[in-house]
Image: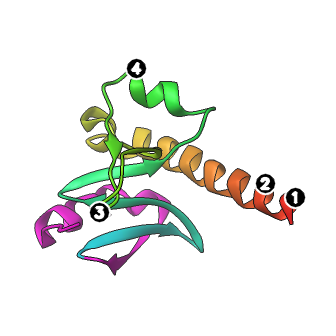
Amino acid sequence: MPVSADYLAYVMEQLEPVHATSRRMFGGAGLYVSDIFFGLVDDDMLFLKSDEQTREDFLSRGSSQWSPPGMAPTFGYLSCPSEVLEDPDELALWVRKACDVALRKKAAKKRKS
C-alpha cells in the first residue's frame, strides 16, 4: 500500500475544501472528514468508499476496484476518476457521497446489532 509523499500532498491539497485529514496506514493513507473514514490512498491512487447507490457513477467513468493486500478486489472502494480529482469542487461532491456511504454502512451495522 505504498504512497509517495508528493502524491499524498497533492490529494490533500485537492481535498482542502472538505477539510479532510489523512492518517498513515500500512504504507498508504486513510482519509477522513471529521471522524468519517471515506477513502484511502494506495499505490498513488485515490480510492473513495462506494456502495450500490454510488457504484455506477464510478464504473461509468472507468474506475477500478481497490485490492486489499493479499485479497481479492472489492467494490467497497473504487478509484476516483482523474477528472474528478483534478477539480476540487467536483471532488468535494464525490467526497460527500463517499461520506454518505460510510454513514449508511455504519447505520446498517447498528441495525444488525
Residue found at x 12% / y 68%: 4
Mark positioned earlier in the residue sequence (1 or 3)? 3
Quarter of the image that includes the C terminus: bottom right
Residue found at x 72% / y 61%: 106
**Label 2 with label 1: CB-CB less than 8 Å:** yes
The relative height of residue 4 versus residue 53 in the rendered view (above or below) is below
The residue under label 1 is 111
Numbered range of the magenta stretch:
1-26
Q: How many marks?
A: 4
The residue under label 4 is 60
The residue under label 2 is 108
**Nearest-to-viewer mark from 1 and 3:** 3
Structural distance between the alpha carbons of marks 2 and 1: 5 Å
Structural distance between the alpha carbons of marks 4 and 2: 26 Å
In-image side of 18 versus 25 (left or right): right
Mark positioned earlier in the residue sequence (3 or 2)? 3
The verdict on residue 21 being magenta is yes
At label 2, which amino acid type do we have? Ala
**Nearest-to-viewer mark from 1 and 4:** 1
The verdict on residue 88 being magenta is no
The residue under label 3 is 69
Quarter of the image that includes the N terminus: bottom left
**Label 1 with label 3: CB-CB less than 8 Å:** no
Q: Secondary structure at mark 3?
A: loop
**Nearest-to-viewer mark from 4 and 2:** 2
Between 112 and 44, the one nearer to me in the picture: 112
